[in-house]
Amino acid sequence: MGFCSAVTLAFATIFSLVAVALLAIAFSTDNWITITVKRNVLKDKISILENQLGKEQNEVELDMKESPLYFTRTRGLFRECYPGEKSEDPEKTSSPLGERVVLYMSPVETWCRNLDYYIPDEKDVTKTLGKEEMTRIHMSRAMVALFIVGFFFMFVSFTAGIRGCWKTSPSNITASAILMLIACLFSAGGMGLWHGVEHWERNKITTKSDTELFTQSWPEELYKNSEFKYEWSYIVSWIGVGLALISSILFSLAAVCIRTDKEREDAMNMQYLMPVYHQKQQAQPYGPYGYAAYPGPYYGSQYGPYNY
């Protein structure tokens, strides 16, 4: 294996491993987006919220106590988490109280709730949802499926790449490049659907909800005092997609280098192969064994003259 193929293959392997690691981290963490709510400001504007929501003061105060829309939170693909302590005191808690949402302690010791994909839909909730909400759910399910399929193609790409490195086979390395490219496209498709879900939630769905990010139905004061910000899980995911694409390109270049090295090696070996041609011998007058094989008249002997 030449210098070009060795270096290119090494970098392709490193980038592919980093890509799958970053995508796995982003897939499993809950810091895709942070919704920061100015809760203290909203507490001073309860009367305005009453008018915008058409509710009584005690109902607005109950919403601010139990609805997750009034709490700062981070959101991932599967969970929504509330940083800070949970307290039964509504003035001190950083997480919703009551039974409106079910919270549990996550592995990183934050209070979280699961995002519902309705798989399975045990209570037939999806039958009561509108067209736009069902479109959002289908896109959310497809997004998760695309990421999982992308991970599968990465695993198959690694298998083909290991086989190609072991046998120094340009065809296997090319297959690994194609599979990595497919994995990159599936992951990028998952990212695209994530943005589609985000767009649908903020701009298409007008149904009122106490838990979801349907901002079109939020009161104006809540929307003004809520800030959306992309976080590190989202950034890490796009970096992983980019590294998967770079890895695919490097695998392709490595296959070209290996094929070129093999052709150069075969050309050098041809110089040491000498052609051998069959040569015809000239006919000899005494046969194939020469004149010595045929006795002739001898005039004397090596043992001297004989006297009879």
Image: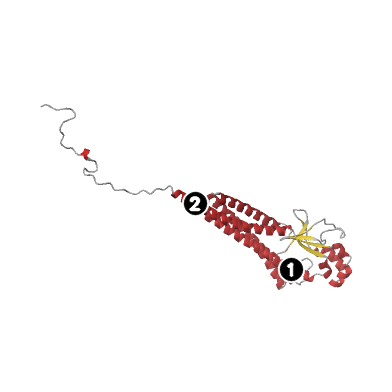
> Where does the image place residue 151, in percent across and percent down from the top left?
63, 58
Could you say which is closer to the camera, residue 109 or residue 235? 235
Which residue: 72% across, 66% down? 198
Write down the quadrant of residue 137 in the picture.
bottom right
Res. 208 visible in picture: no
Q: Is residue 133 left or right of residue 8?
A: right
Could you tell me the amino acid type at mark 2? Answer: Arg
Under circle 2, the secondary element is helix
According to the image, label 1 marks what residue?
Answer: 201
Mark seen at residue 264: 2
Task: Give percent across and percent down for residue 134.
Answer: 70, 70
Answer whether residue 39 is visible to the viewer in this image.
Answer: yes
Number of disc labels: 2
Q: Secondary structure at mark 1?
A: helix
Q: Residues within 10 Å of mark 1 (few under 14, many from 20)?
A: many
Quarter location, residue 256: bottom right
